[in-house]
Image (cartoon, rainbow, N blue to C red):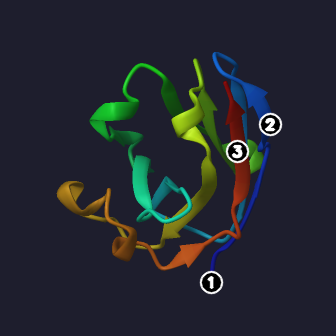
Amino acid sequence: QVHLVESGGGSVQSGGSLRLSCEVSGYADCMGWFRQAPGKEREGIASLCRGDEMEYANIFVGRFTISRDSAKNTLYLQMLRLKPEDTAMYYCAAQPALIRTWLRPRRDSYTYWGKGTQVTVSS
């Protein structure tokens, strides 16, 4: 069993930054960040798996960075140069077993999910 709690969301102006946190209890070989805007599908942002393997969806490369602090059992998502189209609910996800690389962006590859944290970017 893995329990996830996200925090760090909020309202920022276009161009601003936020760092999301996900407190993790339990073991996971792979973790990921996803987001879902109203009326849209949940999309994968980045994953971090055993061995510090990181994967990013192309549209986020250069603006979003995934990282973790193992001592604090916390996963992070640093978001820079935020845009109004980044407005969404952001979710942390975890999977106890290692996920094959090409499956890591898929929401159905993850069993455990947090409740999400809202990010709102105004123009």
Name the amino acid type tagged 1: Gln
Q: CA distance from mark 1 to mark 2?
A: 32 Å
Instruction: Of the two numbered discs 1 and 2 on the same chain, state the one appearing first in sequence.
Output: 1
Taking the image as shown, residue 6 lies to the left or right of residue 77, namely: right
Badge 2: how crowded within 10 Å, few (<14), some, or many (20+)? few
Q: CA distance from mark 2 to mark 3?
A: 6 Å
For the C terminus, the image quarter is top right
Instruction: Of the two numbered discs 2 and 3 on the same chain, state the one appearing first in sequence.
Output: 2
Of residues 59 and 24, the one nearer the viewer is: 59
Mark 1 and 3 residues: CB-CB less than 8 Å, in contact?
A: no
Q: Is residue 105 above or below residue 25?
A: above
- Residue 35, horizontal then vertical, whole percent: 52, 54
Name the amino acid type tagged 2: Ser
**Which-is-in-front pick, marks 1 and 2?**
2
**Which-is-in-front pick, marks 1 and 3?**
3
- Residue 6, horizontal then vertical, whole percent: 74, 56
Residue 108: image quadrant is bottom left
Name the amino acid type tagged 3: Val
- Residue 83, horizontal then vertical, whole percent: 56, 27
Q: Is residue 100 above or below residue 70?
A: below
- Give the residue at mark 3: 119
- Give the residue at mark 1: 1
**Which SS class for mark 3?**
strand
- Give the residue at mark 2: 11
